[in-house]
Amino acid sequence: MNDPCVILSVEKGSMADKAGIESGDVLLKIGKTPINDVIDLMFCASDPASSIQYIRNGVRNTAIIPSSERAHQLGVRIKDFKPRSCNNRCVFCFIHQLPSGLRSSLYFKDEDYRLSFLCGNYITATNLSEKDIRRIINRRLSPLYVSVHATNPSLRAKLLGNPGIPNILRLLRRFKRRAIRFHVQIVLMPQINDGEFLKETIADLEPLFPSLLSIAIVPVGLTDHRRKLPRLLAVTPEYALKFIALMKKEQNRLRSLYGENFLFLSDEFYLLAEKRPPSYSRYEEIPQLENGIGMVAEFYRGFSRASSRLPLKVNPSRKIALVTASLGKKALRRFVIRMNKIKGLDLYILTVPNKLLGAGVTVSGLMAGRDIVHAIKTHPNFDLYILPENCLNPDGVLLDDLTPSDIQKQTGRRIFVASGRASDLIPYVVGKKEVARIL
């Protein structure tokens, strides 16, 4: 068994607990359904479960389940599956541009359709076997998140550094026929997959609507650590301004043809061009938010209403620094201007130059702890420093393994991590909510 489903814990009083299942057992089947990973566990959750097959100490066992029970009452937590790795060498791969010395997990390139379904990770779909495709269809693993970049077969093979890749359009058309929905990503590289190639890509993808839920175009990210890699051009402010205008025509065309627009540009394009990103007010959920689509709009949702209830002054006076990257400064500008109309409040945007990855990396999600420490020590006269939550991974660690607690210890200043929207941040800024100490 290559990746056994080891049971990590059993909920007390659950079906598994009553059946005598213990942590450390290896789950094999629930009823007639083989359990290979958490997806199989989810799939059989509503089915009757007449038995559970498992291995304990090398011995296969079967536990009989009462007919009144259902698999969703199983009550076990199984070991995470080992993600599949990527078989491409993309010319723009961000991992290939990382400096040495970071934690090992940052250098792992995952390419696993299960993570695409479960977590929204992007896949190129170049390592899918026929068995995988059938499982996606039979298990209804939808939506998926697919990195296309270009539909032209030779250009896509060149971009992915993999001459043997399958035809992506053929796969996506098959998914549409079987009602599997998907979001698509295009990493835009000036003079490579833009222009006529991009026009072709959009034209090839649009007939896949409505199974095609959205197309997100994001600018290529370039660090100072591109060694022995193809030369790529960055998206400049001038390029971004022209590109926005060009894509506006495409968005209007799609809206007139299909009744809605499903082509989106990441907020980076608008901020680079010194333009306010779209408000996405018609969207209850913004497509591909985690890909940088509508993050500024999401931050400002509810802000106008909250602004009408702001106090005229704060007492005692407060000096607060919002820690962010250069693009974050542009996004926060409107918030800071309004908040600084409050008497006694001095809200400041502390921009952190990215010395770890390079000046070309301008998003707050890729700030390093050491760079934040340096910025705070250079500007030490604030009562509180607020970090954006997106600069931390799920374990609360920054890119270089520092934590907010480490930053607080090294600077001797009060640190707070903000989550949510501007309206959620306001009570902490004006002092209506107490900021808990990190240390």
Image: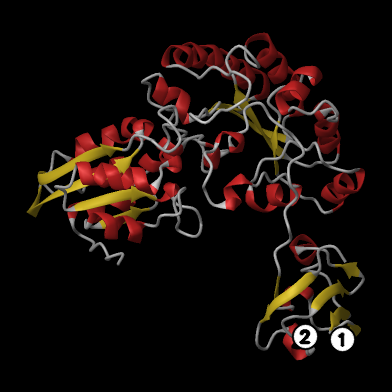
- For badge 2, the amino acid type reads Ile
Q: Position of residue 72 (x, y in %)?
A: 74, 73
Residue 387 falls left or right of residue 360: left
Task: Return the residue nearer the eye: 264 or 165.
Answer: 165
Q: Quadrant of residue 297?
A: top left
Q: Earlier in the sequence, mark 2 or mark 1?
A: 2
Callout 2 crowding tier (Cα within 10 Å): few <14, some 14–19, many ≥20? many
Q: Position of residue 334 (x, y in %)?
A: 27, 33
| Foreground of the two, 347 or 204 | 347
User: What is the secondary structure assignment of the residue under circle 2?
Assistant: loop
Count the marks: 2
Q: The C terminus is located in which quarter?
A: bottom left
Q: Is residue 11 visible?
A: yes
Q: Position of residue 404 (x, y in %)?
A: 35, 57
Circles 2 and 1, Cβ within 8 Å, touching? The answer is yes
Where residue 383 appears, as percent x and y from the top left, is 16, 53
